[in-house]
Amino acid sequence: MIMYVQITAVGIIHFVLASMAGSPVFAISRVINDSFYNAMLWLNPNGISALLDNIHSANVYTSIELLTSYLVYPLLTVALFVLC
């Protein structure tokens, strides 16, 4: 039961952060702060913010952010798995 509550809480937090970052999935979402949006480009574990930013602009740094998101989080997962 605790695992279901944790997964639900993580999902709700991800939806709130996505709507605050201006995700086009939500109709009422908007970017609340430029620095928050830039942080989400680097910290989003799914890389969706960086992927959408790459589609909407010609930002060169987005590819680095996207690679960081797609490489760092799986490596952290493997490291945590090995440590356990």
Image (cartoon, rainbow, N blue to C red):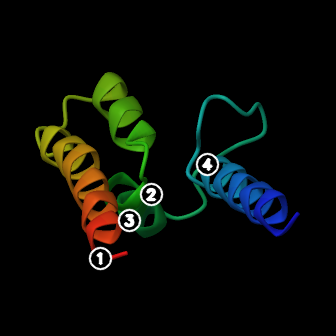
Residue 53 occupies quadrant: top left
Give the image location of residue 11, x and y in percent: 71, 52
Residue type (three-letter) at the residue carrying disc 1 = Leu
Quadrant location of the N terminus in the rendered image: bottom right
Is 84 located above or below residue 65 in the figure?
A: below
Question: Which residue corresponds to mark 2?
Answer: 37
Give the mark nearest the N terminus, 4 or 2. Answer: 4
Give the image location of residue 8, x and y in percent: 80, 55
Give the mark nearest the N terminus, 4 or 3. Answer: 4
Is 64 located above or below residue 36 in the figure?
A: above
In the picture, the disc for residue 49 is none
Question: Which residue corresponds to mark 3?
Answer: 39
Question: Which residue corresponds to mark 1?
Answer: 83
Q: How many marks?
A: 4
Give SS at disc 1.
Answer: helix
Q: Are marks 4 and 2 in contact (CB under 8 Å)?
A: no
Q: Is residue 13 left or right of residue 40?
A: right
Residue type (three-letter) at the residue carrying disc 2 = Tyr
